[in-house]
Amino acid sequence: MDREGRAVNVQGTSIQAATTELSIQKVALQHAPLLHGLYQAAPGYFALLGSALPSLQEVTRDLETALYDPRRCLELLYAGEELIGSLDYKLDYPQPGDVTINLLLIRGDVQSSGLGRRAVRDLEDRLPRARPGARRLLASVLGDNARAVRFWESQGFTFATDARPVMTWYAKPLQVQATAPR
């Protein structure tokens, strides 16, 4: 889907992660159909969790709830003009200075192309400027998801908290941006 929500043919899509511009768009309530379409394009995630794909109504309701939380950040991820994923993270959670990634979802047909890695790097670059108090980035891994664990560890995250059987958390310190002397 493109930024306006028009369906695009994704079969045979060949996104070059290294050369395609990655951009973000903050999620608003009218983006619920885009988010729902993204979930439909990543059914393996929901299968891994043993849950059904959420309906558009459920996605809309979840989005309404999320948008009421001022610490919650929801973003759509684009490679060029093509919607390829979403990023959901929470500021100052669980501790002040922590930023927790609740979900990084990359469309199934473009997974393993480096786009998830680029999205995480982009967030790491943005956070020190956008949130000067941010000190640590955490990623929650739901269920028994060995692929997600490998992904986060390859990004420099280390095991932080065991909350099994529901989730495990991985953490990485953020680079603190030095302030220029006056």
Image (cartoon, rainbow, N blue to C red):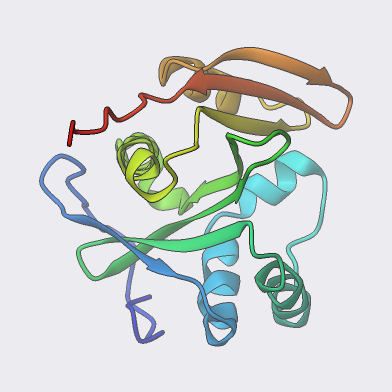
Identity of the residue drawn at 87% across and 22% down: 164
In the rendered image, which quarter is residue 59 located in? Answer: bottom right
Give the percent coordinates (x, y) of residue 44. 62, 46
Identity of the residue drawn at 60% across and 32% down: 139
Q: Is residue 135 above or below residue 43?
A: above
State the residue lying farthest toward the front. Answer: 182
Q: Identify which residue, 99 or 101, lies in the foreground.
A: 99
Identity of the residue drawn at 72% across and 78% down: 64
The answer to whether 117 appears left or right of 61 in the picture is: left
Q: Is residue 109 above or below residue 35?
A: above
How many callouts does the rendering have?
0
Q: Identify which residue, 181 or 120, lies in the foreground.
A: 181
State the residue lying farthest toward the left. Answer: 19
Q: Identify which residue, 7 or 158, lies in the foreground.
A: 158
Identity of the residue drawn at 40% across and 51% down: 109
Give the percent coordinates (x, y) of residue 167. 79, 29
The answer to whether 173 appears left or right of 122 in the picture is: right
The answer to whether 144 appears left or right of 18 in the picture is: right
In the rendered image, which quarter is residue 48 located in? Answer: top right
Q: Quadrant of the C terminus?
A: top left
Q: Quadrant of the N terminus?
A: bottom left
